[in-house]
Image (cartoon, rainbow, N blue to C red):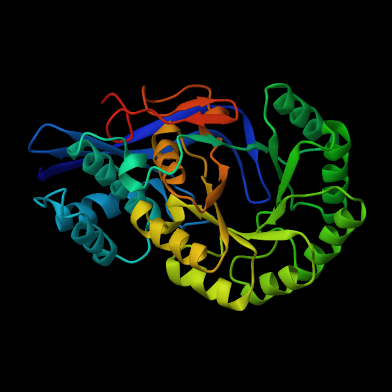
Amino acid sequence: MKITDIQCFDVEVPLITPFKTALRTVDKIKNIGVYIYTDEGQVGIGEAAPTAVITGETRESIIGAIQLYIKPAIIGMEIEEIALIMERIDQCLHKNTGAKAAVDMAIYDLFAKRYNAPLYKVLGGYRKELVTDITISVNDVQTMVDDSLKAVDRGYEILKVKVGKNQEKDVDRVIAIRKAVGPKVKIRVDANQGWSPKEAVRIIRKLEDADVNIELVEQPVHYANLEGLQYVTAHTETNILADESVFSPKDALKLIEMRACDCINIKLMKTGGIYQAQKIVHIAEAYGIECMIGCMLETKISVSAAAHFAASQKNTTMVDLDGPSLCLKDPVTGGPTFENQWIRMSDAPGIGFSI
């Protein structure tokens, strides 16, 4: 099965409510989809999320990277040569991880279709169901409490609470949500790089003293401040999850060796796709570090690829794949089933979409 063409297309989906973090506010997903065509009539699909504040990519840069660099590097190659394909994708240009991820997942879609198997089974087949958290956007305290209660009423048992805009209000937000939802609901706090190391320690200790029982705090400090992340990890009891600080296997290994985090958030848009994500999860597993599989503002296309990867691996113990639940509609049919907190894999070949 040879690659004959690669084409990009726009993916635009409105959100149910605006998505607010310490970094940005978004009311519509505007991503880039990828179709990879083959000489046997099979089509693979992928998606890239332009996230300039994290990956540095824009819509135009993603299309340019795919059409001008990645496409010429792999046209004519056999899908079965997956390791060689991934090497050429990685070497044809530096960074551009979202663009690489879109092509990577379309290649894996075709690779699994080549063997008439669902992708999660080709990658390892560890489990068939996942439980995801749902994001509570940063807002005033009462709005966040209301949103949290609505999520719990829908059946969500894990909340990912966005903070990082005002340290004193951040404490109030989390305490108020805990009081409202009760002790059984898990709470994950995501600061999106919004605190300084000392602020982070002060806030986390206040939450610990208030017995809020947080499962973890995600990326409390700036992504490049590895020593700061190390400081927060060393001076708090709560688990610290590294996100924007980890793009590559080398990043993961460095943080682990520094003891700068307790767990790692893997996102395909950061790693450049499934091929490199596998390396990170295996490095982390070797050191006893558990991994979360997360997503950016993505639709069912790329989130489904991430779900297949999460389902395939033992060490992907936490899931933050609520993208489709935040969307007003899905741009594709088929694939895994997203029903509130439950993500259930299907046995359709590849990622499972009807293309």
Q: Quadrant of the C terminus?
A: top left
At x 74%, y 53%, the residue is 164
Q: Is residue 319 left or right of residue 206?
A: left
Identify the image quadrant of residue 110: top left
Q: Quadrant of the N terminus?
A: top left
Residue 24 at what x, y percent from top left? Answer: 62, 46
Identify the image quadrant of residue 152: top right
Residue 283 at what x, y percent from top left? Answer: 46, 66
Residue 20 at what x, y percent from top left? Answer: 66, 40
Residue 189 higher or lower than 279, as above or below: above
Q: Is residue 69 left or right of residue 215?
A: left
Does residue 128 appear anywhere in the picture? yes
Q: How many callouts does the rendering have?
A: 0
Residue 46 higher or lower than 244, as above or below: above
Residue 124 higher or lower than 288, as above or below: above
Does residue 61 appear anywhere in the picture? no
Residue 25 vs residue 250, the one in the foreground: 250
Residue 320 at what x, y percent from top left? Answer: 57, 42
Q: Is residue 273 left or right of residue 35?
A: right
At x 44%, y 65%, the residue is 248
Q: Is residue 125 left or right of residue 297?
A: left
